[in-house]
Image: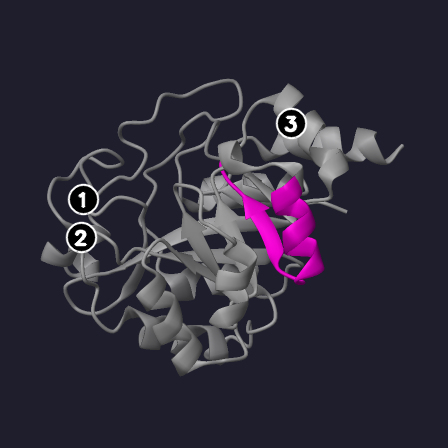
Amino acid sequence: MTKIIAHRGYASKYPENTKSAFESAYQEQADGIEIDVHLSKDGEVVICHDDRIDRTSNGSGFIYEYNLEQLKGFDFAANFESNDEYQKKAEEKIMTLQEYFEWAKDKDLITNIELKTSTVKNDGIEEMVNKIIVNYQQERSVIISSFNHKSILKMKKENPGISCGFLTMHNLLDPEQYCRKYSVEYYHPNHLMIDEELVKNCKNSNTGLNIWTLNDAESIKEMLPLGLTSIITDDPKMAVKIVKSHKL
């Protein structure tokens, strides 16, 4: 059965990559949560999508310019408008990967960790992320992905037992062969790149197919019969409802 992965948590209704977004996605019975990680100035693994904090907080500048204590001083819901689902009650503090696993460690959740190493270096992040995963005994519940495929190979060198996925924006030629060549378990293409031949080839090569970021109900309904591994979406509540209806 196709699983539903909440993109940055329940990002369509809650401030992305915050505890509120993660908790709401879990409450809506998402199978997993996708998060993005960077290194702070003092080497802490923190959860945020952008290289800079301007869009998602009341601060400004690159994450690597701040230590964790300074980052904790910003409100990561400051630019998010309240809605029927989310009524802001307090500031949303940036989470570390350790804090995330403290919350998630006893929950039946897949965690897709995207390494943000394509536009900033974040040197050593693979080693740091692996240490945290191992410390929390989450090796079997995580998928590491990145648009920087060299970063994925670094993670595989750090820990061959951790599942990884190659993120891509555009079509690759024979992506299932590419994944197999480097012993990478998943292919993560944009949902617009999906067709029946790709799905068939990935299944035949035992390559998991996790597509992103699909937020249209009708498109999700069309995709489900293909038997994808998972759909990454900003609206897990809607997507979970469709999957449940599809099973009936």
Q: Amino acid at mark 2?
A: Ile
Q: Quadrant of the C terminus?
A: top right
Image spot of residue 123 (x, y percent): 20, 70
Q: Nearer the viewer, residue 193 or 54?
A: 193
Q: Quadrant of residue 129?
A: bottom left
Circle number at residue 52? 1
- Mark 2 touching mark 3, by CB under 8 A? no
Q: Which residue is rendered at x = 18% and y = 56% of the image?
A: 120
Is residue 124 in view from this perspective?
yes
Image spot of residue 11 (x, y percent): 46, 34
**What residue does disc 2 label?**
63
- Horizontal side of 228 relative to 66 (left or right) equals right
Dot 2 falls on a residue whose secondary structure is helix
**What residue does disc 3 label?**
238
- Mark 2 touching mark 1, by CB under 8 A? yes
Residue most toward the right? 248
Check the image and report above or below for 116 versus 87. below
Choose the circle earlier in sequence order: 2 or 1: 1
Question: Which contiguous range is marked in magenta?
Answer: 197-213
Dot 3 falls on a residue whose secondary structure is helix
Residue most toward the front? 173
Check the image and report above or below for 32 versus 9. below
Q: Quadrant of residue 100?
A: bottom left
Choose the circle earlier in sequence order: 3 or 1: 1
